[in-house]
Image (tube, rainbow, N blue to C red):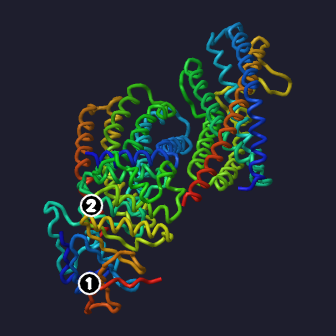
Amino acid sequence: MAIADLANPARFLAFADRTIPWLGGVAVIAFAFGINQAMLAPDDYQQGATVKIMFLHVPGAWLGMLGWGVMTVAALGTLVWRHPLADVTAKATAPIGAAFTLMCLVTGSLWGRPTWGTYWVWDARLTSVLLLFLLYLGVIAVWRTVEDPSRAARAAAILTLVGAIDLPIIKFSVEWWNTLHQPASVMRMGGSTIDKSILIPLFIMTVAFTLTFATLVLAAMRNEILRRRVRTLRLIQASAAS
Amino acid sequence: MKPLAAILFRDMRIAVRVGGGALMGVLFFVVVVTLVPFALGPDLALLKRVGPAILWLAALLASLLALDRLFAADHDDGSLDLILMGRAPLEIVVATKGVAHWLSTGLPLVIAAPLIGLSLNLDGPAAAALVLTLLVGTPALTFIGLIGAAIAVTLRRGGLLLAVLVLPLCVPVLIFGVAAANAAVGGPIPFGTPFTILCALTLASLVVGPFAAAAALRQEME
Amino acid sequence: MRLSATDLACRRGGRDVFAGVNFSVASGESLAIRGRNGAGKSSLLRMVVGLVRVASGRLSLEGGDPELTIGEQAHYLGHLDALKPSLSVAENLQFWSAFFGADNAGLNEPLRAVGLDALADLPAAYLSAGQRRRLSIARLLAVKRSLWLLDEPTSTLDAAAQVRLAEIMQAHLAGGGIILAATHGALGLDDTRELRLADTPPPSFVEEDQGGREQQET
């Protein structure tokens, strides 16, 4: 544990302390605006108001995938550059990404019940997102089970890189396989197929959720750095007290 | 009572703090259930029919997971020696450890089962029956597992021997558990028949398990 | 109270470890068990507390509780420390104290006596080997039992901790306790008798050195 190890995280802590409050504040404002717009948006002619679950479901899906993307970059940071903050980022992002993936699965399930008549179906997109969720839980299990933080980081990093293959599968699953889930309608070549009155609230809610995601990740990283400090202090305390 | 409460709280504290705790068993349970549609195909009607059986099998395997460290951990760090020198009868201590194992492994499975059952297209009555059979049956799985865990305590690769010993003994519980879960949703047999037999099996295991396990532990120590 | 052994023999793994062992220890007395590695010092201690079966011979405790076995009235400090790394120092001690039926309120004193009171909330995983040993010794103080069977109690302890252990053992003897300790080195006690387990396997004889002062080895 050299001074150099603390310097970078210490600068990060200062950065986090400054950034988290106003990032969170902007997220709250975005939510206020987004929820307002979502309420004003028209109901679907077939699904009624149920279609508005989309404003939770789509951001959940996007952030679940973004979370794994962040973890993948962090994994490269751990394995290739051994950057000290990479471990912390990976560990902090995992539960948050998992939570958003779970939100996507649950809202999708609740949306599916009135729309398709079932809570769950084993089609390509739902299954690949469920696999993503299980992969998240697996990475979290690795973090919690391996005692030494740097060994845990390397093990989790390898698992993250291998699991990253699931991301393109999720994205293209609705095209490669015949699925119950609707095909891509937002990010498409040739422009979106959704009407602007729904698209704009969706966009705002996505931004709001993403800001929340960023705030949560920064806060979790700060917690993790503090947790590691406590651990170091305990080790020092134990060896000094002899 | 105080020594038993001490064992119960210690085992549960360790289960929660170490290695993901209860959630690891539930995670394994979810993963195993997720594998089934890949093997069987996504036909929802088929999954609904085999759902209770799949969930029971997964619960059995997940229960098995935490068993092999149950006595081995205490044996390896010398705690078992001291437990044998305590004034509480070994049978009761073993039963208490069984209770702690069920609370930290079996009970979370019972709670997670209806949710996971949704993915296999189980509806309300089926899920409720399944939960009831698991609630009554998982203690039997734990207490039968105590016997295998005690026999395998000194072995290095004890986990496999444990599984080989315990799984055959658990077959009656599996049979009547699945029969009861299926009987609740239809069929010629009333729910009560297999269910009461399941209850009887559990009650028997609550007695036989600790006695057999304590005897096995004493043999190991000599 | 008197602990007596008559013609004790031990078999482990099909081979005879020792035979014909005799000793007698009364309240306030201590016995150091010596012998080369493999002579059966640990087995003898474990036999007294009931963890190893008596192959032949007799063990008896006069003046103890007739309802309890010898092991249920004894403390055993073996090579392993019986500590859970995920529990804190205090939690580990609380567990054994509650398990053996002692009063949980008086745990500060034992921790202070072994010098671990400052680390009470530290997870046991962070302790060094010597600190873990000292925590095990704290268990002997937290739960009152007259008979102490100690297997290499001074191993992993530094000089200061060994002195503290000697004080603890002396206090136990002064209170009427009995100590049997398997050890290679010095225990730091006055008037310890010696039991030497013979080098060659049985049939053999063992010598009991009565009333002599223990050799102080450096």
| Lateral position of residue C154 relative to residue A116, left or right | left
| Lateral position of residue A169 relative to residue C7, left or right | right
Where A191 falls versus B31 (above or below)? above
Q: Is residue A62 visible?
A: no
From the image, tell me which residue sits under label 1: C211
Residue occupying the point 22% across, 83% down: C22
Query: How many numbered marks appear?
Result: 2
The amino acid beneath tag 1 is: Gly
The amino acid beneath tag 2 is: Arg
Residue occupying the point 34% across, 79% down: C41
Q: Position of residue A86 (x, y in %)?
A: 74, 46
Q: Quadrant of the C terminus of chain B?
A: bottom left
Q: Chain of mark 2?
A: C
Q: Chain of mark 1?
A: C
Mark toward the viewer: 1 or 2: 1
From the image, tell me which residue sits under label 2: C145
Q: Nearer the viewer, residue B221 or A20?
A: A20
Q: Position of residue A32 (x, y in %)?
A: 71, 14
Secondary element at tag 2 = loop
